[in-house]
Amino acid sequence: MALGLPRLMGIVNVTPDSFSDGGRYADSAAAIAHGLQLAEEGAEILDIGGESTRPGAETVPVEEEIARVLPVIEGLAARTKAEISIDTRKPEVARAAVGAGASIWNDVTALEFSPESLKTAAALGCSVVLMHAQGDPKTMQNDPYYDDVVEEVFSYLSARIRAACAAGVPADKIIVDPGLGFGKKLEHNLALLGGLERFQALGAPVLLGASRKRFIAALDRDGPAEGRLGGSLAAALEGWRRGAAILRIHDVAATRQALAVAKAINAP
């Protein structure tokens, strides 16, 4: 049976220290222009982040994070039909973002960062991305370890779905993300990509974020993150074949084109 194409989530980092494009879109006007360009290229979702979660990143104060993302969300919500997602760990930031026009809360801590996170997600009524991470951004890549990474991540996400539903988040508002690069070595990332079908059993759409991540350089050669397009496309295509419903990506036009060709080749 032919697979439908995944939704494309374009990344808009409003940060000075993102691993891929740190500082390039820290200015609100530049970030808005970038988001509009990604939407024009085919992004159905724009994921706005005001705090880097790269390995070693420091926490950003709530007020500063809100000041970074709110003008961008407001500017994009008024000028594009793309859904707006807020990439944050903090319930205060999520609340402000939804008030400004966001409809998705993308949380790398799966609503565990704050005691208020679960309650806030339920009250907001927005869609929520529950992502797996071992450790926090500052320490997560020190020495991650798993006996069976696919089953351990699956069990964690299953437990977080139950917690979210118990707090009042509707099951049909939940999206899951295995968290490539978040407390994972190369072999863990490859195992999760190779075992992505397993996560279909959770009953929630699967989001895959492999774009430009360091594991790609580990398989080829290190260099600037912008030089990882080929590996990003390979991971996106493999993720699509294995059931990813959403691809979180930097290179929207190239990914859209790669998917269109792959789908045409595989059409019955």
Image (cartoon, helix red, strand yellow):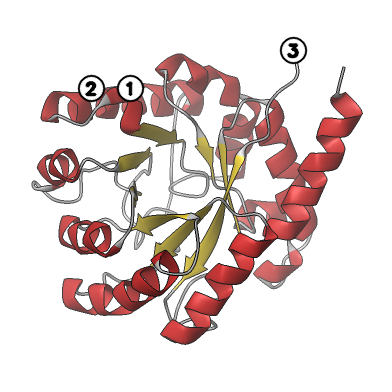
Mark closer to the chain start, 3 or 1 = 3
Between marks 3 and 1 in the image, the one whose residue lies nearer the viewer = 3
Label 2 Cα crowd, 10 Å radius (few <14 / some 14-19 / many 20+): few
Residue 267: horizontal and vertical position, in percent?
Answer: 86, 23
Q: Which residue is mark 2?
A: 162
Residue 105: horizontal and vertical position, in percent?
Answer: 32, 49
Above or below, comparing residue 20 to residue 174 in the picture: below
Q: Which residue is mark 3?
A: 1
Residue occupying the point 19% across, 43% down: 121
C-alpha gap between disc 2 and disc 1? 6 Å
Q: Amino acid at mark 1?
A: Ser
Q: Secondary structure at mark 1?
A: helix
Residue 76, image quadrant: bottom left
Q: Amino acid at mark 3?
A: Met
Q: Is residue 184 left or right of residue 86?
A: right
C-alpha gap between disc 2 and disc 3? 31 Å
Residue 228, image quadrant: bottom right
Q: Which mark is residue 158?
A: 1
Between marks 2 and 3 in the image, the one whose residue lies nearer the viewer = 3
Q: Are marks 3 and 1 in contact (CB under 8 Å)?
A: no
- Residue 57 shows in the view: no
Q: Amino acid at mark 2?
A: Arg
> Quick one: 7 or 151, which is closer to the camera?
7
